[in-house]
Image: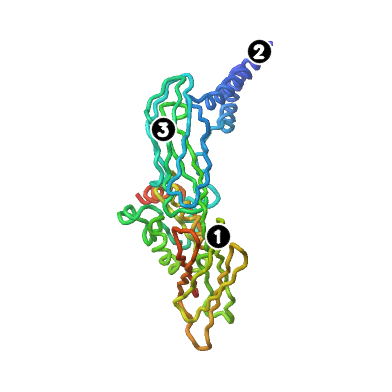
Amino acid sequence: MRMTKVLTYYVLLPGLIGALLMLLHPSHALWNEPELTENEVTLSIVESWNEPVIWIDARSVVEFEKERIPKAISLSPEVFESNIILLLNEWEPGVRIVVYCDTQLCDASHETALRLSDEVGLPDVYVLYDGWKSWKKSKH
Amino acid sequence: MCNMKNKVILAATCLVLFLGSYSEVYSERMVWEQTLIEKVANVGDLQIDAVFRFSVQDKPVTIQSIRSSCGCTTASLSKKRFEPGETGEIEVHFKLGARVGAQKKYIMLQVDDPEHPSVELELQVYIPHVIRLEPRFVYWTKGSAEYEPQTLSVKVDVDVPISIQSISTDQEQLKVNWVKTDEKEFEVILQPQISEGEIPFFRSVIKIEIKADIPLKQTVFYAYAFMKS
């Protein structure tokens, strides 16, 4: 009986409180899924669609030419005007567009995605969370 | 009695741990005047500069690295190590290039504060479009019984009189007209005209030339009209 009390007060209860504290703590992290902004998607979400998507590479042309997601179209700010026609040739109604840059730290993917939806007027434009890094990680 | 005492000790310990964990989060070594700066660019600006200022609290701080989210943005500081009580600043320069509209640029710092090893600074800049053409892409479904007209909008963001000098397409099957709907707005109307038995065009490039009283970065704009299956 005494042993049960000791376990309850000194192990079980502090453990539960500790777990609660971790959840309430302002700096606690979510381990499984990253926090996504409105139009961000993870690679696993893209793969779960089970449909072909158009990949847009918003990194620099040098990085694009070195390595890229197969069939991706380069649309970094420097080649946006000259290459937009390649995307419009490829695009069909209902096909989703996913834009990526290097990692979560770059913002070229968000910039390009915004231009595609607001300026060009294309629907279903998404940004790949953690960009090229997440693709490389998943394929190696 | 002893049981009650144990419960009180346990509750007090939990409270101390809880409050302690929060105070660690908020007792930062660096205190920033602001971590977000918002600016509006003027027409013709090539670069926007911003300064993020901080003061160092009771322990010294070393800034180990600075990284920006875009090649267009650079950040610099006069030195890396700061003693308690010192102030410092990070100078940020954002080259606008051909960018327009709302822009967000981030500066990420790594510091030797084990509780707060990274700091994120944000620069938000609105760059006036001067002239905005939207949407730049329209499409019709091939084989439709009727092709409804579609409209592009040309809007002026600043107080400068403009006029449309010319509009042309590379397809005879696409007719283009434009009307002035407001002091600062035009509508460009696109209407496919495909006779019976004719194969509709695949794509058309629409070229719009603008004339203004001030020098503009861009006076020729392109839109695209497609027939999609």
Nearer to me, B107 or A103? B107
User: Which comes sooner in the sequence, label 2 or label 3?
Assistant: 2
Secondary structure category for the residue under label 1: strand
Chain containing the residue with disc 3: B
Chain containing the residue with disc 1: B
Judged left or right of residue A27, residue B11 is right
Q: Which mark is residue B110?
A: 3
Occupied quadrant, residue B149: bottom right
Asked if the residue at tag 1 contacts the one at tag 3, i.e. Cβ–Cβ closer than 8 Å, the answer is no
Q: Which mark is residue B156?
A: 1
What amino acid is found at the position of numbered circle 2 in the picture? Lys
Tell me the CA gap for discs 2 and 1.
Answer: 74 Å
Q: Is residue A123 above or below residue A12?
A: below
What amino acid is found at the position of numbered circle 1 in the picture? Val
Quarter of the picture containing the N terminus of chain A is top right
What amino acid is found at the position of numbered circle 3 in the picture? Gln
